[in-house]
Image: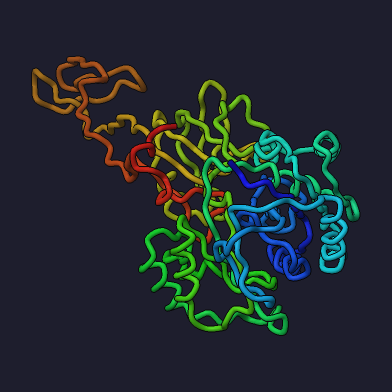
């Protein structure tokens, strides 16, 4: 049974120019030194297609209270070690909100027009249904506030308060699948300056840790653990083993972290993907569609590849240039091939922007090598026109279209899975290395 805890969650505090919702976690914990974590800090990614997200659409949820025992190490801040506890008692949610909300108010990036923070505190958590809606759909603030009221929760809105949606959804998350991420933060005097990470140490860490993922992009020579924005994060390493992540963190050389925290997360779980039929796809959906290729791929300006995919209804499936090998695989598909395409639905032009591809079955295609020989005089016969067969120009003998000599078309694509390079993957994308081998063909 879960430890009774008071859940504190917040969202929508950052901007493209700085801050980070996870960094705010460290500031909140610094200002609540008398409280303990009664479980892992939670980093929860939500629908990547919402139009008003600032960067990665992440919310944070902290189970807080008074812990018992020594606990398990999960971070180091200015105040010292941070540990989470298996036993403890919750605190009053209204008092917790009164203490935490001012911290959010001091540090959120209110100057960004899309930043609309929200803070929620509750013991009785929202239904898991709220999480599944928020990771796959667009949820209204009115619906969320109605559920929070029914649960006796307490919340605070800043500006439009849309962050209440993400905070409540993070609180509602009950993991079916989970990963972890250890995030190291920079010293404040280095915010906005180039990060000093030795690439060789990242490559070595990637090779020597078997349960981490998305560390390094060999196709683009890109260090993927370091963000590109001027936020407080130095690096973030994701994986399936908290113990191995602690080891991996210490393998990174260069600029030293000012503090760090280890989160449980839904990253790499593909929770945002739902199985859909083409006719049911709506703009903003993230879905997987099983269907048949009905057109030859077309390469459009920019190097992107587009083909038609159908299961009764049809939609354009778009493979962007940045997906590299997956795009090249799509270019080798032909009508009649059966595939499963994972991606997000664009409204105009209506298309499925593909994020992962499984080629299930390749259809048989042949090409004509030569016209048939005349069985009477041994000369090559001539075509009588499209679909009309062949006739010998010497003796007039006729032969059907099928009498021509054909050979199988060599295919440049194989049955199997294809995904983009590491630097082109979304936070929720489930890498193929995380997919159980026995279930990899189950759709």
Residue 399 occupies quadrant: top left
Q: Is residue 45 left or right of residue 404?
A: right
- Residue 417, placed above or below residue 426: above
Residue 389 image offset from top left, x and y in percent: 28, 18
Q: Locate the N terminus and report the quarter of the image it occupies.
A: top right
- The answer to whether one can see residue 349 in this image is no
* Residue depicted at x 32% and y 17%: 388
Q: Compare residues 307 and 58 and report the one nearer the observer.
A: 58
- The answer to whether one can see residue 66 in this image is yes
Residue 393 image offset from top left, x and y in percent: 20, 22
- Residue 369, placed above or below residue 324: above
Q: Compare residues 147 and 269 and report the one nearer the observer.
A: 147
Q: Is residue 291 left or right of residue 96?
A: left
Residue 142 occupies quadrant: top right
Q: Is residue 325 left or right of residue 41?
A: left
In the rendered image, the residue lying farthest to the right is 159
Q: Compare residues 325 and 19 and report the one nearer the observer.
A: 19
Q: Locate the C terminus and report the quarter of the image it occupies.
A: top left
* Residue depicted at x 72% and y 66%: 29
* Residue depicted at x 19% and y 21%: 392
Coloring basis for residues: rainbow
Residue 356 image offset from top left, x and y in percent: 48, 45
Q: Compare residues 62 and 340 and report the one nearer the observer.
A: 62
- Residue 219, placed above or below residue 38: below
* Residue depicted at x 58% and y 39%: 352
The image shows a total of numbered marks equal to 0
């Amino acid at each position: 049974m879960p430890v009774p805890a008071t859940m504190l969650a917040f969202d929508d505090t950052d901007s493209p120019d700085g801050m980070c919702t996870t960094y705010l976690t460290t500031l909140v914990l610094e200002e609540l030194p008398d409280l303990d974590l009664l479980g892992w800090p939670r980093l929860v990614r939500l629908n990547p297609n919402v139009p008003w997200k600032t960067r990665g659409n992440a919310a944070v949820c902290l189970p807080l209270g008074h812990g018992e025992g020594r606990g398990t190490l999960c971070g180091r801040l200015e105040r010292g070690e941070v540990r989470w506890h298996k036993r403890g008692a919750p605190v009053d949610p209204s008092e917790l909100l009164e203490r935490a909300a001012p911290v959010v108010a001091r540090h959120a990036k209110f100057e960004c027009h899309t930043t609309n923070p929200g803070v929620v505190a509750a013991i009785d958590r929202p239904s898991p249904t709220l999480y599944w809606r928020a990771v796959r759909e667009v949820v209204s603030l009115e619906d969320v506030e109605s559920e929070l009221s029914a649960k006796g929760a307490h919340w605070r809105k800043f500006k439009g308060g849309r962050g209440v949606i993400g905070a409540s959804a993070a609180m509602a998350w009950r993991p079916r699948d989970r990963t972890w991420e250890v995030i190291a933060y920079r010293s404040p005097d280095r915010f906005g300056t180039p990060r000093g990470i030795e690439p060789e140490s990242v490559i070595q860490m990637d090779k020597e840790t078997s349960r981490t993922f998305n560390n390094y992009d060999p196709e683009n020579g890109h260090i993927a653990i370091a963000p590109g924005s001027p936020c407080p994060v130095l690096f973030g390493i994701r994986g399936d083993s908290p113990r191995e992540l602690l080891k991996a963190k210490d393998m990174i050389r260069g600029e030293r972290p000012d503090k760090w925290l280890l989160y449980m997360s839904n990253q790499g779980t593909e929770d945002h993907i739902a199985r859909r039929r083409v006719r049911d796809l709506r703009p903003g959906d993230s879905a997987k569609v099983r269907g048949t290729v009905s057109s030859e791929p077309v390469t459009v300006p920019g190097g992107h590849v587009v083909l038609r995919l159908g299961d009764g209804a049809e939609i354009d499936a778009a493979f962007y240039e940045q997906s590299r090998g997956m795009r090249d695989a799509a270019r080798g598909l032909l009508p009649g091939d059966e595939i499963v395409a994972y991606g997000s639905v664009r409204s105009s032009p209506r298309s499925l922007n593909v994020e992962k591809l499984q080629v299930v079955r390749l259809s048989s295609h042949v090409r004509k090598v030569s016209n048939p020989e005349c069985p009477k005089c041994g000369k090559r016969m001539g075509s009588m026109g499209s679909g009309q067969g062949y006739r010998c120009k010497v003796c007039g003998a006729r032969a059907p279209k099928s009498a021509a000599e054909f050979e199988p078309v060599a295919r440049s694509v194989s049955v199997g899975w294809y995904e983009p390079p590491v630097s082109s993957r979304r936070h929720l994308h489930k890498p193929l290395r995380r997919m159980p081998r026995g279930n990899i063909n189950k759709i």
